[in-house]
Amino acid sequence: PPKTYNCGGGNRWKKKVKGGKARVVTMIDEANFEVTRSDDNLVGFIAFNRPKRGNAVNLDMWRQLPEIVRQLEKDVKVIVLRGLGKHFCTGIDLDVLNTITTLDGNKVEDALKFRDLVLMMQESITSLERCTVPVIAAVHGCCYGAGIDIITACDIRYSTQDAVFSVKEVDVGLAADLGTLQRLPKIVGDGVARELCLTARDFGGEEARHAHLVTRTFPDHKSLMRGCCDLAHSIANKDEFAVQGTKHILLHARENSTESALNYVAVWNTALLKKEQILRQLAKRKRGGGAKAPKSKL
């Protein structure tokens, strides 16, 4: 994983040690995010950078995240989303909740302000899902409330074994409205999602893995980041158009019938699949870029 520090002279980040993995990257707001790239420029890292507040997401972060994603996806092939400090994300910042509680639901203008606020935060999270490149969530410490909203919009989720998850919204008097209730059932199943959302109970990394919320767990944060980096580079070294197309088709299939999705992928490949892509990948495998496939016995 990249090793960086805030150099303090503008919105830029530099290598912490000689030979480190991070490149200098211009950031939108150094107070909220750390944005870096691997030195081969294949993998981008977005880190929540409010460790003293448990990486709770404030209004500026909701507004900035989509732009960060849009800028980074132009330059890298995979994005890793993580949190600095002890936690991945402890949910929505209390200042945001205080802003919401000042609105008067009996006034039309305040009701519309609340709706616009919720839609803005929903769009912020959806930017991870719409991102053309795969997004990997690296979860450690607490992942509460909005943290669950965020990781369910990612393509792959890894965590430490001692990570703690919770869909906290019912404990603060509201229904989750940023994506968990829509995405979580499609990941863990309807029954498990109902139990987790209605009870707001804590559950650990191993339970998250058994429920398929995360794919793998790791004994500590260091091994988690190593695993995420290995995964990211494994994906980044594959044909980028095949990877991006696979992500797009999977999202389409999730929201449509099997028949519709099969027709869609047929049209997609008819329009976009090029002979050169296949020949390039076959040549790469021949040079040792991929595992040897066993000979067919058919």
Image: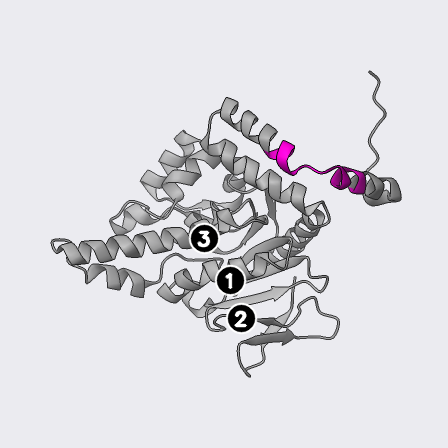
* Of the image marks 3 and 2, the number of the one nearer the N terminus: 2
* Side of 100 where 249 appears, left or right: right
Q: Which residue is the site of mark 1?
A: 68
Q: Which is nearer the eye, 268 or 25?
A: 268
Name the residue: 53% across, 62% down. 47
Q: Amino acid at mark 1?
A: Ile
* Of the image marks 1 and 3, the number of the one nearer the N terminus: 1
Q: Which residue is the site of mark 2?
A: 27
Which mark is nearer the camera, 1 or 3? 1
Q: Quadrant of the C terminus?
A: top right
Q: Amino acid at mark 2?
A: Met
Q: Crowdedness of circle 3 by 10 Å Cα count: few (<14), some, many (20+)?
A: many
Q: Amino acid at mark 3?
A: Cys
Q: Quadrant of the N terminus?
A: bottom right
Q: Residue furthest right?
A: 287
* Of the image marks 1 and 2, the number of the one nearer the N terminus: 2
Q: Which is nearer the eye, 293 or 197?
A: 293
